[in-house]
Image: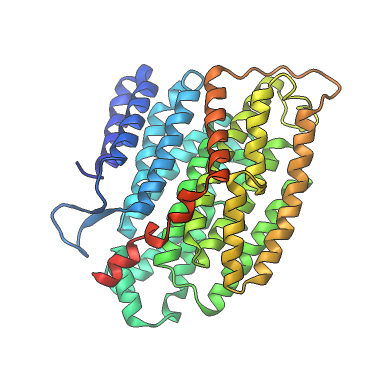
Amino acid sequence: MSAILLIAIPLLAAFLSIMMKKTSSYILLAVGIFNVVLLFILPDGFVIIGGFRQPLGINLLLDTYSRIALLLLNSLILVITYLNLKSYKSYGTILMLALAGLNGLVLTNDLFNFFVFLEISGIAAYLITTSNKKPRSTFHYLILGSVGSSLFLFGVIILYAMYGTLNIVGMIRLIQASGNYKEVILPFTLMFIGLGVEAKLLPFNSWVKGVLGNSNTLSGPMIASVYAGSMSFVLGRLITNLFNFQGSLLTIVTIILAVGIVAGDLMAFASTKTREILLFSSVAQASIIALLFVNGIIIWAVYLIIANALSKTVMFLVINKATKDVGSDESQDLRGLFIKNILVGVTFTLATLSVMGLPLLVGFKIKLAFLTGLADANHIWLIAIILIASVIEGIYFVRLLVKLWYKGDKEINVSYNYSFKTVFVIIALALLVFGTYSTPLNYLDNSIDTVMEEVNNG
């Protein structure tokens, strides 16, 4: 079997589901289960398509890094689909298209096909956000996403004109051989901005407030967890292996990301709407992840992507379900939400505390590790900024938790079914277990990313 099945099967299923609309959600569940199982069987390595050896033709790369990314996004799509099986059953075909596009983004070793999969996954994302019933926000997202992908394509065209190849591994070799850093500043900047739109990096993410601020139990976790996690993984891959951030460009990128961390947390602090608090927190976390990749702290950036994706899945599902039942996401209107939903409240609290990076949860292990890595690299000013942002983050999250746990003027009646509660408990237990038993985290080293090994050893 080949990794191409991770893309081909969802695409084929998407076409079949058009003719079987009533069963599209069930087809998606079957495809999701198939992909997750397949990821435990497929071997690492390059997949050559069309018989052309590198650097010609199209090829995919499945390694430890991409396998982790694929397991995360395929599993989350499977869970989100299951929880929304009845409410959004007409979106099965769109979600299969998203699955194919995101799998292709993670797997491809060719920049042009990267752009193709970026467009496929982008179209699916725009369609998913139509479930918010806010066409203006979806249109805003469509425009900014199109501009971002166009900038990315423009950067790819420049690189192709310079080096005559679109193969990522081949291009890395050629750039290293040329040794001329300044000539790639423009294409790298354009590509970084283009991906920054989808990765929710400030100042390229003005679409986020309209989309996630009006999200539901489908669009919220899909955009905030699945898409955000996938885009962080592919951005990290390119930052680590292709983008040659040095000198003044490195300084500019670092400053932009540092400002994004503080600005995201300040906007969350200033908001009284629960969905806005979560989305601005996600903006800050996306900047931290990109900052870690820029500084070569790959392992803990990967763990942070996973922890955030799991936590935000719980948080957006809890809040969006409550918003739907109550009719408002104002924190004041949701006071006392957890009084009659103690189990849900405990899992939401654990997910929140993990994002904050408090002890006994995996978020603490991750934050301590990447702060240590930044200290070893003498980035004291970055540590100071992250710690200041963490204090701001702690204030607004504690303030939110107090409101959700303590009774307000009126009684809140929100019901979470057994499936929701089961997912919440499993994710909360995972955050707690890996926060107290960190042996798997301690033994994972830089073999998580093997592209540079392929480049250096041919």
Rendering coords of residue 423 (x, y %): 52, 28
**Side of 128 where 267 appears, left or right:** right
Visible residue check, residue 133: no
Visible residue check, residue 423: yes
Rendering coords of residue 77 (x, y %): 44, 34
Find residue 291 and report its image quarter: bottom right
Above or below residue 376? Residue 125 is above
Quadrant in which the C terminus appears:
bottom left
Question: Residue at (67%, 20%) from the top-left corner?
Answer: 325
Quadrant in which the N terminus appears:
top left
Above or below residue 168? Residue 304 is above
Question: Residue at (37%, 64%) from the top-left corner?
Answer: 156
Above or below residue 139? Residue 90 is above
**Side of 140 where 238 appears, left or right:** left
Q: In the image shown, does 213 or 138 lie closer to the viewer?
A: 213
Find residue 436 and report its image quarter: top right
Above or below residue 281? Residue 254 is below
Find residue 6 and report its image quarter: top left
**Side of 410 where 80 appears, left or right:** left
Q: In the image shown, does 353 or 275 lie closer to the viewer?
A: 353
Q: In the image shown, does 73 or 405 lie closer to the viewer?
A: 405
Q: In the image shown, does 391 or 432 lie closer to the viewer?
A: 432
State the residue lying farthest toward the right.
Answer: 409
Rendering coords of residue 430 (x, y %): 53, 37
Rendering coords of residue 304 (x, y %): 54, 51
Give the colour scheme of this rendering. rainbow
